[in-house]
Amino acid sequence: MTRAVASTLVIGLTALGLAACGGSEGSDDGGAAAGGSPEGVDDGTTLTLWTRAPLEKQANLLVDAYNASHENQVELTIVPNDDYVAKVGAAAGSGGLPDLFAADIVYVPNWAEQGLFQDLTGRIDQLDHADEINQGHLEAGTYDDMQHVLPFVLDVSVMFYNKDLYEQAGLDPEAPPTTLAEYAEHAKAVDALGNGVDGTFFGGNCGGCLVFTWFPMVWAADEDVMNAEGTESFLASDTAQDVYATFKDLVDSDAVGAGTRDETGATWVGPFQEGKIGVMPYPATLLSTADETVDVGVAPIPGPDGGESTFVGGDGIGISKDSENSEQAWNFLSWLMSEEAQVEVLAKNGDVVSRADLIDNEYTSADPRVVTINEVASKGRTPVARNFQQAFNAPNSPWLTLVRNAVFEDGSSVEEDNEEITAVLQQ
């Protein structure tokens, strides 16, 4: 998730609003399917699938594996991250959505309510392993007691650290930080190496990046960032302010990489991949990419005083309201939840599986870092709010304003900024 949940929402809202007026043409399909085959139909139909660019690698692997073993054939379209919301919105308004499309999980609640996905409830209920599927993604896609999406690719946030730089800084490369205080200490120790090396880095102008990596620091203290209804923000709590204070100290100590303040997410992970950053929260799906240039250590994201958690993000996938091939599209989705897809495609690639009963497999056990990623995934959360995008991800969101005031300014407006987040959540 290179941009994690950072893509621009505003440009697509008008088109999505138009789509809502038409409702969901396939909204009763999940119930009607209860008498059909749990596997759907594999009869040589050509299916269309859209996904966003950050998941291109996983999407290609899954589609190639499906196409090689089925009569149906999936035609995959990869859309640039910043263009995805607008493309989906325009297609929804004109009845031109593909058979299947994936969506950043924080967009799913709004898109399910807008009627962009068909109801999958009856079909999901027929799966033998339905209770093992990641509940955060299922809940994000549930509207009016109907389930609309399955997990496509899970992404979780973890702490990545450069073992070589740790060693050079006199730190134990096998002892990652277990509290935010230790994280700051380690970052400062690496930063002292100089010669173009910095302690840490973060997307200081990227609301989605900050959601993905900082929310877990609050959850690790067993606290919430919002109420259960997603209508009230708790991001002025003492724990949340401890998080902001940690990063303000790193900024004031000049232990962060150049460009942190203005980083919008486009090059968020670049400095680490170049071997210039000691330790930073990171998308787990990019382990294989970072591993090409850095000796990567992986650890859970801690809270101020310890604990661990993660943001269970990534994309959900569903059958669009416009698809006339729902039985064939379900064949792809039911296969996606199979052991073949989850283990032999995703786990083999080092990705987190979407079924709890498949976490222990030959591929995860082969790499202790992947074991860590899968273990922390079971302790993570997927926040759900209808107006999540506007409150947190939009370029000028009140969440981004809060963070920038707290970390780069004097921090005196946290309470007021938090109230603005709540106001947007309640719109």
Image (cartoon, rainbow, N blue to C red):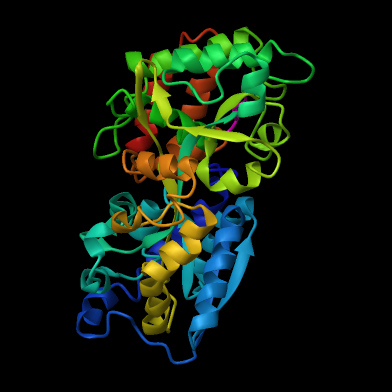
Out of 233 and 153, give the one closest to the viewer: 153
**In the displayed structure, does residue 237 sit left or right of residue 343?**
left
- The residue lying at 27 percent from left, 63 percent from top is 147
* Residue 90 visible somewhere in the drawing: no
Out of 38 and 405, give the one closest to the viewer: 38
Point out residue 36 in the picture as x, y percentages from the top left corner: 25, 85
Q: Residue furthest right?
A: 195
Vertical placement of 100 versus 104: above or below?
Answer: below
- The residue lying at 55 percent from left, 81 percent from top is 68
Vertical placement of 13 versus 209: above or below?
Answer: below
Point out residue 304 in the picture as x, y percentages from the top left corner: 39, 16
**In the displayed structure, does residue 76 sit left or right of residue 340?**
right
- The residue lying at 56 percent from left, 27 percent from top is 280
- The residue lying at 69 percent from left, 10 percent from top is 192
Q: Which residues are magenta?
A: 201-206
Vertical placement of 135 versus 306: above or below?
Answer: below
Residue 340: image quadrant is bottom left
The image quadrant where one finds the C terminus is: top left
Out of 111 and 271, give the one closest to the viewer: 271
